[in-house]
Structure formats: C-alpha cells, structure tokens
Amino acid sequence: MNIPLIPRKILFGNPERMSPQLSPDGQWIAYLAPDEKDVLQVWLKSPTEADDHKLTSDPKRGIRSFFWTYLPDQLVFLQDQDGDENFHLYRVDVRTHDVRDLTPFPGVRADVVAVEPQVPQDILVALNRPNPQKHDVYRIQLESGAVALDTDNPGNVLGWVPDAQLQVRAAIAATPDGGHEIWWRKNTADAWQTILTLSAEDQGQPLDFSADGQTLYVLSSHNANTQRLLAWEALTRRFTVLAEDSHYDVGGIFMHPRRRVVQAVSFNKEKVHWQVLDPAVKEDFETLKTFKAAEIHPAHGDLADKQWIVTYAGDTQAAQYYVYDRSGKTFTFLFSQRQSLDGLPLVPMKPIEIETRDKLTMHGYLSLPSTLHPPLPAVLLVHGGPWVRDRWGFNGMVQWLANRGYAVLQLNYRGSAGYGKAFLNAGNREWGAKMHEDLIDGVQWLIDEKIADPRRIAIMGGSYGGYATLAGLTFTPDIFACGVDIVGPSNLKTLIQTIPPYWEPMKASFAKRVGDLSDDKFLESRSPFFHADKIIKPLLIGQGANDPRVKQAESDQIVSAMRAKQLAVDYWIYADEGHGFARPENRMHFYARVEAFLSKNLGGRAELPDDPAGHSGSEN
C-alpha cells in the first residue's frame, strides 16, 4: 500500500473551525475553534475588524453547542462537567465578553426550549429541578438572570413547543403503553387537549407554530408507514399533509424565522434530498444546487432573511461553510472544517443495499482502501442508538480505517430510524437476535462479494454499537477476528435499571423496543454479560467514567466476568469522559490503542502509538 498514513491527529483532533452562525442583525459570525490549548471555544468574526476574537475560556472539555439569542450581542452555550450531561446554560456578551451561568443548579440538566424574536429578553429552558425525573419549563431573563417557573410538567411530558409569543402551547407526552400523545392548548391558562394519539409503533412530535399560532406543524407516521410533515389547524381540528415520501421519513425542516412557514424539507435517502414547499425560496435552492456538487445544508442567517449560512458536505472532503447573499445570489467562503485534509488520500463512501435473510432491504455504506485489492481485512462499524442511522458524508473514523487498509461496512440494520415505522419496529425486542442477524448478513455479503477475508473481520462501535460488538463476540464467537466496544452496555437489565432519572417517562417505550424488566430470562438471553464465557476472540473496551446513559458498571461487569474465566480483555477508562470521548487528547490516546489492536489482529497498517499529554485514560 503506497499511499501515506493520514496522521490520527488530523482525523481525531479538534476541527479547525466549525458551526458558523450569523447573528440576527447580520453583524457578527460566531463559530467554534480550538484555542492555544486546543480546547474548543466560541469565537467571533466581525466584518469591520481583521482579527477574530475568542469569546469563551472553557478550561478543558471544550464547547460544542451554542446559538445566538435575539437580544443584541448576546449568545448562549451549553456545557456539562466531564461528560455527566448535566448541562448548564451560559450567556455571553460579545461586547464585554462577560460570561454568566444562567442555570447554576448542581446536578440539574438544562435543555433549551426556545428563544423568539418577539420576546428577545427571555429564554425558555427545561430544568429537572426540584424533581430529577421531570423537566419543567422555566423562563429566564437574559439580562438579569432571573429564573421563574413557566410551565409545570405533570410528569410524562418529554418535549415542549412555544408559539411566536414564547407561550408554551404544545407538548409531547409519553403514555403508559409506550406510545405518545401530542397536546395543544389555545392559551396558557387553558387545560391541555390531546390532538393526536400515537401508538407504540408510531413516531411523531410537534415541531412549531405558525406566526398566528393557529397552525401547529407536526411530524407523524400515523395512518402511514413513514413520518410525514403535517399541519394541524386549530379551527378545523384537521391534519393536512405538507410533505411525504413513501420510503423515507421527513428529516430536516427549513422554516422562515419571522413568517414561520415551512419553506423546505429534507429526506435523507442514500444522500440528503430537499423538497421545496415555499415558492419564495425555490430559486435560492436551485442556486445552491448549481453552485457546488455536494450535499446542501442551509440555515437561516440574519432575521431579515437576506443572508443564509450554507454548509456543503461531501464524503471525501470536510464540510465547507459559505455565506449566501439572497439578493445577489452570491457566495462568500468562510472556512473549511478541516482544511488540513485537503490533498490527502480520502476514499469515497458508496451507498449499498443488502437483502436480509427474511427479505428486508437493508441500506448501508461501503468504503474501500484506494490501492488494495480484495479480499481485504474489514471492519463492521456499527452505529449507536440504535434508533438513529448512518448517513453518507465525511466520517473521520471511516477514513482512518480505510487509510489503514480495511474495508469499512456501515449498516442501517432493522431498528434504524429514517426508513419508516415498519423497518423501525422490525427491531422491537430484537437486540442480539434479528438485529444481530442483520449484521451477520452484512458480513456474509462482504464474503460473498469477495470483498473481505473471512478470517480477518472485526466488529466495532459505540453505545448500541458497543453492545453489538459484545453480542458479536458472545452470540457468534466464530464470526469475528476481534472486537472494539466503546461505551457499550453488556447487561440489558442493569442498563434499563440505571437510566438517567429524567428518562423515567420513556421506560414503557424501552419495554416495547428492548424488553421488559419483569422478564428476567428474556433480558438475560439477550445480554452478553451472561454469556461472557463464550468469548474466544480478542476484545478491547473503552469507557467514560461519568457516562450517565451506559454506566461504567456495564463495562466493569463484563470485564470481571471474563477475567474470572481467565479470558483476556484490554480495558481503558477515561476519568473525565461520559458517553463517548469529547476531549481530543482522549480520542487520540484511545484510537492509538485501537489502531495497534486492529493491526495485531487483522494485519492492517498502524501509525506509531503515542501518549498525548493530558489524556485521562487508565488501563484497568
């Protein structure tokens, strides 16, 4: 293999710049970039000044979520403590650089509900105080920081939707049978009314109100297989279909910030496709498509709707960001997410379809090393969730594996989202069973197509992908040469018993989709922990010590079970991480171990191991 090794630092280090957002008045662009200590901070670009300004000074973990408010020169960001997901909401003044914690409540998680241009001084935030099992809505004044209860949660509400006046008038609530109800009220003083009941097999959620508050936009799969975009009219109490696809769920929504009409929707097929609903933006979307051959991800910029921020995404190039001027139909390049990738030997991601043994169509992606010939060592890279999906585009982990000489297969196995409720529900109570069989069918496809060497196939993934790795090595011990489990659950009983307290309303849904806690034998049959003695192939595990979703005990217990049987396992714990590895020092440290592990067991290439300063990993 003559192509050069792409350094891990380029692929697993922080992005150079990302997530640009235009201020509502169009005067500023804020974005994320690392500081001199390689910690992601919020930075500011000004059209009148040559130098960019750093607005935040996060000491270690880095900021990943921020947005502008409608109060002049004020933005907010979210940050947790070492991955515990108890996010605090902070306000930043871009003139003075003053930072204020708006939710200084220990052990409480803040979820932003909304900001609105008509009520610029306030922000609605859901906080699980005083009851950790439910999030009530609080109104916070951005200037003073005053916090007041706005809307009480009866205990089963999972999400809230305010209108243009920042009044909470819609909600989605869990039901005891694992389904959901969409609630509406005419005024905040009125009682909630149920306007749509969704069974446990359906998906849906309220999205937003029209400008006059008389129309509620909803996603729902009721009376259909896929999630459609619907408009519910308060006057007639009827739903109207605005957009649908017979095979794919509605994905993204592009909505005008002032007019509050849905202008376009996306469907994530093999790639993202946009359907324009509003004639006012039809020409704009045509201009976006002809400007650059890539996936288009537009976002409204200024409140006047004169400028958009447009992201162009591809599989062999990191995201590129532009400011699009609607009046002149012109583009101004901002920056690339990872310019250091330019000119490096990246490989394309090919959409594929595989028929499962019970005749379902499973979609996925195949990425191959550019100069090697099959049969190749291969990695089955399993997405987490599991109720999400893999998608086309640049993926640093995929490029890393392909560069090291591995064929990389990503599968949207049954239970993955985006392909309609029949495919999603085909995964109900099938953890470690038909969902796992889909992965094995993908492995067999690699072998039948003579892409992969059957003796050199690894399974790897995070969260559910970590579970799938453990299932692969326990339930089908002869299939894989090795496995890499990243924050994966090993025992479905303890996984459900230790979910975060604010997930309590979702327990009925877990019972439908994973299994019921009352059925010990069933959950044990699907839990790798109870079959750890069957593991005969090398296993590497990475775990965050503060993971609130998949507790460290999930990894501890299977490691203990294996070692009690004198079975070897490599186990790394990162003291300042949660559900995944956010800090680049930890990512580079762990994936150096993964690279050496795969090279030893599959025969691929490996960059020399390193021990980056500041990582928190310890071998256990």
Image (cartoon, rainbow, N blue to C red):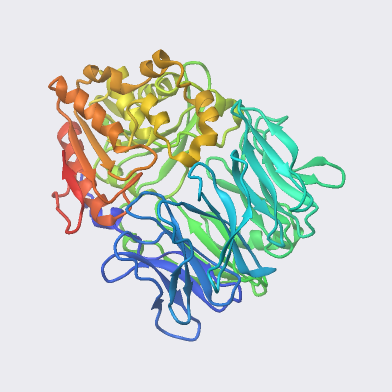
Q: Nearer the viewer, residue 385 or 144?
A: 144
Furthest toward the right, the residue is: 236
Vertical position of residue 74 compared to residue 423: above or below:
below
Question: Residue 556's x, y, as percent?
Answer: 24, 32
Q: What residue is drawn where x is 41% and y is 51%?
A: 107
- The N terminus lies in which quarter of the figure? top left
Q: Quadrant of residue 569?
A: top left
Q: Quadrant of residue 163?
A: bottom right
Where in the figure is residue 428, as x and y percent of width and height? 51, 23
Residue 532 coordinates in the image, percent (x, y): 25, 20
Q: Where 253 sits versus 415, above or below?
A: below
Q: Is residue 135 left or right of residue 191?
A: left
**Percent x, y of residue 240:** 79, 42
Q: Quadrant of the C terminus?
A: top left
Residue 388 seen: no
Residue at 68% over, 60% down: 166
Residue 46 appears in the figure: yes
In the image: residue 180, left or right of residue 352? right
- Front residue of 460/449: it is 460
In the image, is 295 to the left or to the right of 257? left
Identify the residue at the far top of this view.
Answer: 521
Q: In terms of depth relative to the viewer, which is nearer, 160 or 155?
A: 155
User: What is the residue that sits farthest to the front in this orientation?
Assistant: 130
- 581 vs 252, left or right, is left
Q: Is residue 153 above or below residue 55?
A: above
